[in-house]
Image (cartoon, grey):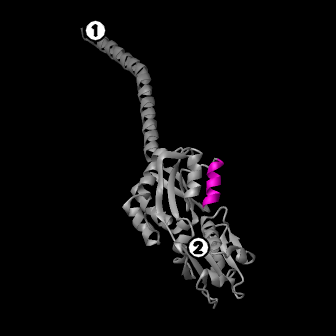
Amino acid sequence: MIKMNKVSYVCLCFLFMMFLAACGSTGSTPGSTSTSTKQQSQQSTSELSSTQTEVTKLTISAAASLTDALEEIKPIFEMNYPKIQLTFNFGSSGALQQQIEQGAPVDLFLSAAEKNMQALIHNHQILEGYSETLLTNELVLVSANNRELDITSEADLTNPEVKVVAIGIPESVPAGSYAKEALEKLGLYDKLLPKIIQAKDVRQVVQYVETGNADAGFVYKTDAVLSKVNIVHTVDSELYAPIHYPVGIIHASKHIKEAKVFYEFLTSDEAKTIFQQYGFKGL
């Protein structure tokens, strides 16, 4: 009886071990599947997290005269909207318009003249319902600090001691177009033509005057107050078309949703306060 118990015990142990082996063998597959599923879940979560934290980069083409104000707005906006990063492309409004017309990957356009925005609207390149005039500016005549020249008006530019007058390229730089328009109405443009040098944008005009490469120049008031030049005269606003800065979302933008967010921010009181600190005015 005892021997039978021992045999039974041995058999029972043997069968139990076989059972455990079978469970281990069959359990490896579910265990493997569980690990695989877990890895897939982790990967999906990682991808989802990546999507949630992905930063959208917006490209904004803006008139050079907006440089300082927009550079101050940038960190404030990105702090409020950390998933949107701003990249600025500054230049003359005419050149920026041409880039957009040629398919440059731009999300928003801020021009220093209505005509450049209107051209894009006419070509259906601005998103309908998302363009408006944002700011206004003034045109001033400036001279170099280190030049003792008696310049108090446009007429003084015809004096022999004034050798060089800088303006933006009228065909592509709105500030240059405004200056030419004013001088033509005063009957001075043709007289000054031999003295005039043209710059690629309004910032280059300031540079020419600051460095003494030009005795005087026509720039926006907002650029003059931030530079090392003297404002000697404010050009009569009746002599040129109103200086308006329109903003618009590019129809071909691949980030329309994010572009709308920045568009709305630009039209907010917070942004307008910053623009005003740089001398811009609202309508």
Alpha-carbon distance for marks 1 and 2? Answer: 113 Å
Magenta stretch holds residue 101: yes
Q: Which residue was labeled with disc 1? A: 4
Tell which of 186 and 228 is nearer to you.
186
Which label number is shown at residue 13?
none
Mark 2: give few (<14), some (14-19) or many (20+) Cα within 10 Å.
Answer: many
Tell which of 253 and 97 is nearer to you.
97
Which label number is shown at residue 219?
2
The quadrant of the image that shows the C terminus is bottom left
Point 48% across, 67% down: residue: 69
Give the residue type that dot 2 points to.
Val
Going from N to C along the chain, the mark reached first, 1 or 2, is 1
Magenta extent: 93-102
Name above or below for residue 105 compared with residue 76: above
Residue 58 drawn at (x, y percent): 52, 52
Residue 121 drawn at (x, y percent): 55, 48
- Pointer 1 with pointer 2, Cβ within 8 A: no
Q: How many marks?
A: 2
Residue 96 drawn at (x, y percent): 62, 57
The quadrant of the image that shows the N terminus is top left
Q: From the viewer's perspective, tell me whether residue 8 is left or right of residue 183.
A: left
Point 44% across, 27% down: residue: 32
Magenta stretch holds residue 136: no
Mark 1: give few (<14), some (14-19) or many (20+) Cα within 10 Å.
Answer: few
Q: From the viewer's perspective, tell me whether residue 34 is left or right of residue 211.
A: left
Residue 2 drawn at (x, y percent): 25, 11
Which is closer to the viewer, label 1 or label 2? 2
Name above or below for residue 280 compared with residue 155: above
